[in-house]
Image (tube, rainbow, N blue to C red):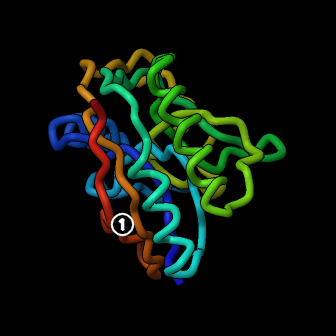
Amino acid sequence: MLRLFVGLALPYELRLRLAGLIAHRFPGAKWVPPENYHLTLRFIGEVDNGRADDIDAGLSAIAARGFDLTLSGVGTFETRGRPHALWVGVERNAALEHLRAKVESAVVRAGCEPERRRFVPHVTLARLDNPDPVRLGEFLRLHGLFRAQPVPVERFTLFSSHLAKDQAHYTAEADYALA
C-alpha cells in the first residue's frame, strides 16, 4: 500500500524564505521541516499499486498551463475553536483552481472517492497542540503581512508519504509537466 498525495513542490529559495518565519518559534507548535514544505492539491491516502498506477495514468493525461504562484499571509486551521495547524496562504489564482479541479477529476476517475473538503490552498508551517495563545497571536500579527515573490509553477507531483515517529517523509513518485 502507498500513502499518496498530489502537490506542488516549492523552490529552494521559497522554502528558505518560509523557514525564516519559523525563527519566531513558540511552545505547542511542532514545526514542519523546510524540506517538507509543499502545497497539497489533493490528498489521496492509502491505495494499492494498481490504483496508484491508475492515478498516475490519469495525472499524466492532464493538460494545463503553467502559472505563477504567490504565497501571502498566515493563519490557522481550527477545530471547535482550537487551532491545530499554522499555515502560509496563497493569493487567489484561477490557474491553480483549474489545475486542482483537473487533478480532482483524474483521481476520482481512477476510483478514489471525491474530496468533500473545500480546497484551501496553503503551506503548513506547524502542527499545533495547545499553543500559547499569546505567542501564537504574536506570530500571526508579526507575519500577517507576509508576501513572497511570485514563483513559476511548471509541474505538479505525485508524492508518497511515509509516516515516522518524528516527522513524515515525502518522496516524489512522478512529476507532470504543465504546458
Farthest left residue?
13
Q: Quadrant of the C terminus?
A: top left
Residue 37, compared with residue 137, is above or below; it is below
Residue 15 in the image, given as x and y percentages of width and height: 25, 42
152 displayed left or right of 109: left
103 displayed left or right of 70: right
Farthest right residue?
80
Near-viewer residue (6 or 62)? 62
Q: Quadrant of residue 32?
A: bottom left
Q: Is residue 20 visible?
A: no
Residue at 24% of width from left, 25% of height from top? Answer: 151
Q: Is residue 74 visible?
A: yes
Near-viewer residue (47 or 37)? 47
Near-viewer residue (158 or 37)? 158
Q: Quadrant of residue 146?
A: top left
Residue 47, compared with residue 78, is above or below; it is below
Density class for disc 1 (Cα within 10 Å; few <14, some 14-19, many ≥20) is some
Q: Quadrant of residue 173?
A: bottom left
Residue at 35% of width from left, 21% of height from top? Answer: 70
So how many labels did they put on this image? 1
Instruction: Please state which amino acid type lies under the numbered disc 1.
Output: Tyr
Under tag 1, what secondary structure? strand
Residue at 35% of width from left, 52% of height from top? Answer: 157
Residue matched to label 1: 170
Residue 156 in the image, given as x and y percentages of width and height: 35, 45
